[in-house]
Image: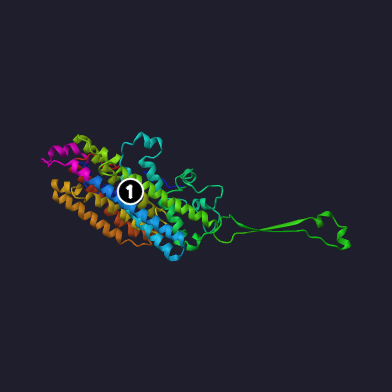
Amino acid sequence: MKSKFNLNVFPIALWLALVLGLSGCDKLFEQPKQAEQAPEQAQVNTEALLSAANLYVYTQMSEALSGAQELDSVITSLLHHPNPGALEEAQLAWIKAYSAYIKVSFFSRVPRFEKPQFRDQNDTYARIEERIDSWPIEPGYIDYLPLYPLSGIVNDLTLKINEEDVSAQHGFSDMRFASLGFHPIEFLLFGENGKRSAKDFIPQENSIEVVSADTTIKEDDSDELSHSDDKNSETHEHVHVEIDGPQNHNRRRDYLRLLSALVVKNLQKLTDRWEPAHGYYAKQWRQPQPSQQLASLTLVYQSMVDSIQKTLLEKHFSVLLNQKQVDDLRSPFSNQDVNNMHDLVMGIESLLNMESGFISALRDQDAESADKMTAVFKRLLRDMKQLPQNLTSLPLDKRKARILPVQEKVLQLLEQLYKGAIMLQLPIRALPVSTS
């Protein structure tokens, strides 16, 4: 069943630590009083900040697109000549492409106006993001599992492997049933427990199963049996069904090829929409009124805070700190969840540190605060980098011992981000905790 976060069941210790960590946070959120008492501040250059944010998202989205195109090329080579070396190269290309996307994925949280055409065609940013990065997923919806050799889209011969039919299966009854995006590609390339064989991509005719039917009629010519009841001379039919390894190789090949092409297609759409000169989303930020620019900046800053709180703390850390048998990971097949968390924080730090970006603007207001935020980021990224790659397979108590100190630094980072928002006069939402 899909795991859903609920504030009522989220670890109380985490929120308590956050409350304790934000010492004096009653004052933190009394923005009007602080604004009245604070000395005159340097004017925030909202236009420069928006330009820096736009440049970051376009540059990073272009890098993700480039990585996806490289992955597509490597997959073509793998399918041309399936072998262990080509499969490993495709796996590494997947890791590189997905890492690039995670660093800009938090921009999907930034609200924006959508063209009526985008809505009519079900092609809004939110829908595209779902088709790129839905997680966690149910692998048995994609392809075979060790105990279920005929499961998944690959083995469903009633389903055509084309964009229309495969897209219709995406999130059919639950978003865990994802048929599109990076993570179905991940499962096809890595397999359960990272044990995908290159032999699974060797061209081979599609067939659900190999059936050996043995039908015999038992008869006895003896006089004694010839006069026995009819039941002793009835027909006995024996049907033996044999499944000889993974099936439907050609469907697996076609599905992988299609998924890769669709990721490239969807990333191209987002890259085009963020292109600084003509992109539809980028043009929305070139507003003449400072108040409109400030509103856009607030939405960008809020997306970073929300990604740390809702994605890192609630979707990554909460799972690792509470599930004995971890089921809701982001990249379980490639074993990249530790790197996923690191990449998310690195992407946010990179945006903040852009030339003429948020850290630069914060330094104009208070150099000490800017230095503190920079230092917290560095310590957090260092500690996340030191988490073991087998973290997700550790027993729950050992996972907690490794994660809790890192979680504390995440809470410190949230504190610094909220202080930075006040100094930059960005009216972001308060934390969902009582400060009384």
178 magenta-colored = no
Instruction: Judge from the rendering whether residue 96 lies leftward or rightward of residue 415; answer left or right.
Output: right
Which amino acid is tagged 1? Ser
Q: Depth check: give the residue in front, 276 or 101.
A: 276
Q: Where residue 221 sits in the image (x, y, percent)?
A: 85, 62
Q: Residue at x 50, y 61 (%)?
A: 202
Q: How crowded is mark 1: few (under 14 residues within 10 Å), some or many (20 or more)?
A: many
Picture quarter containing residue 90? bottom left
Residue hosting label 1: 105
Q: Depth check: give the residue in front, 78 or 297.
A: 78
Visible in this render: residue 320?
Answer: yes
Instruction: Judge from the rendering whether residue 297 lies leftward or rightward of residue 118; answer left or right.
Output: left
45 magenta-colored = yes
Q: Residue at x 44, y 48 (%)?
A: 180
Q: Main secondary structure of the magenta part?
A: helix
The relative height of residue 85 versus residue 362 in the rendered view (above or below) is below
Helix, strand or loop status at disc 1: helix
Magenta region = 29-51
Instruction: Judge from the rendering whether residue 184 lies leftward or rightward of residue 35; answer left or right.
Output: right
Visible in this render: residue 144?
Answer: no
Picture quarter containing residue 210? bottom right
Q: How is the image coloured?
A: rainbow
Residue lying furthest left = 39
Q: Depth check: give the residue in front, 244 or 278.
A: 278
Q: Where residue 303 sits in the image (x, y, percent)?
A: 29, 44
Q: Where residue 11 sits in the image (x, y, percent)?
A: 36, 49
The total number of labels drawn is 1
Q: Where residue 428 sits in the image (x, y, percent)?
A: 25, 40
Quarter holding the C terminus is: top left
